[in-house]
Image (cartoon, rainbow, N blue to C red):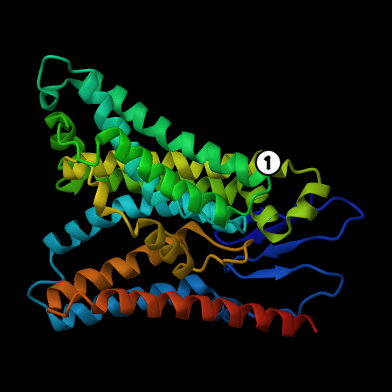
Amino acid sequence: MTGSDSAGGGEDSGKQPGETAGPMTDATGDSAAADSVALPERSAWQRLAGASTLWIGLVLVVLYAAFSVLRPDAFPTRFTLQTLLIETAVLLVLSIGMTFVIITAGIDLSVGMVLIFAGVIGAKTMEWLSPGEDATHAGWGIVAIGFVGSLAGGALWGLVNGFLVAKARIPPLIVTLGSFGAALGAAQLITGGVDTRTVPEKLRNSLGFGTVLGGVPILVLVAAAVTVVGAWLLHTTRFGRYTYAIGSNAEAARRAGIGVTRHLILVYLMAGTLAGLAGFMNLAYFGTTTIAGHTTDNLDAIAGVVIGGTSLFGGAGSVLGTVIGVFIPSVLRKGFVIAGVPVFWQPVAVSVVLVAAVWFDQIRRRSRQDRRR
């Protein structure tokens, strides 16, 4: 197999001798179709200037600086930064799984509802295992079982999504739109439409509000660990190389000997499992299942991934870009609240940034096509 550099790490195109290589990704995060005609050599500055991660990073820095100037007494403070990190932690975990899905040229509209379902399973499991006593005083053993229940609940929906997309060949948009409604309906059936509030105090005090290393929230450390593992998996392993290859050209990947069906099932399974983890984190932080509080989580995750430079056409993207992309809407919302901007402008601003990111991606794709001519 021939190797090529990818966003954040070296990627293998999955090409076998005698076969045409599919699209490949260079070190700046740009995807380029490898063909028989070599692309013109670009200077280091041209590669850097064309890196989407660089530009979205600059956008994040400018936003943070602007709000810091507008409200120097409230925005650039330790408390604001801490709350910003906590509020973004759950969404970041969702977005790491979404990054893998979108790189394969898929989509998952169900992650927000899977988060709710997983949280309900975890909360109800801990409640059911505490008969005759207040579940809020449950011990670590019951909390651990609840955690496994949340992961299993998320993994179940991920497995269903992956099987229907990869095996039944149903478009991922339709599959995950169906899972969106089914997961939410299942959560409401289990709870009767009423939020479960019997979350153990040990869970809330340790994971939800616990800090280490002089004030670093544990939820943030969990999200950071997921991010690091996701970056390692995507940018340095065969699993990541196959993810890029399938998103670039699924048929070419199949002919190169990659088990596309199995790999897609694993990608959606991972996305569902991470949604389950996010559901348990949400449960720990809010102390309730918050059934009505995640209607836009799926769109927020998709927006963060796309703003971060992952192409909706598949085959290109990076975990670092996703991290920056997720923080841009979060900084916008937090800054608007502190600056006193009406909340109705928040979705407008996020939508503008999202459309601009997709437009920029299309410009880059056209530019690469022009260079090949």
- Residue extending farthest to the left is 73
One can see residue 243 in this view: yes
Camera-nearest residue between 42 and 116? 116
Q: Nearer the viewer, residue 99 or 73?
A: 99
Question: What residue do we see at 59% from left, 48% from top?
Answer: 236
Which of the two residues, 155 or 293, is positioned nearer the viewer here?
A: 293
Q: Which class describes the residues within 10 Å of circle 1: few (<14), some (14-19), or many (20+)?
A: some
In the rendered view, tell whether residue 211 sits above or below residue 329. above
- The residue located at (21%, 39%) in the rendering is 284
Residue 187: percent from the left, percent from the top? 33, 39
- Whole-percent x, y for residue 280 in the image: 29, 38
- x, y percent for residue 22: 77, 61
> Which residue in the protein does label 1 denote?
167
Q: What amino acid is labelled 1 in the image?
A: Lys
In the image, 76: left or right of 354? left
- So how many labels did they put on this image? 1
Residue occupying the point 70% across, 63% down: 24
Q: Which quarter shows the C terminus?
A: bottom right
Q: Does the rendering let one see residue 238? A: no
User: Helix, strand or loop at disc 1?
Assistant: helix
Q: Left or right of 158: which side holds 113? A: left
Furthest-top residue in this view: 132
222 relative position to 313: left or right: left
Instruction: Pinpoint residue 29: horizontal percent, then vertical percent.
Output: 57, 67
Q: Is residue 96 above or below residue 314?
A: above
Q: Residue at x 53, y 81 (%)?
A: 359
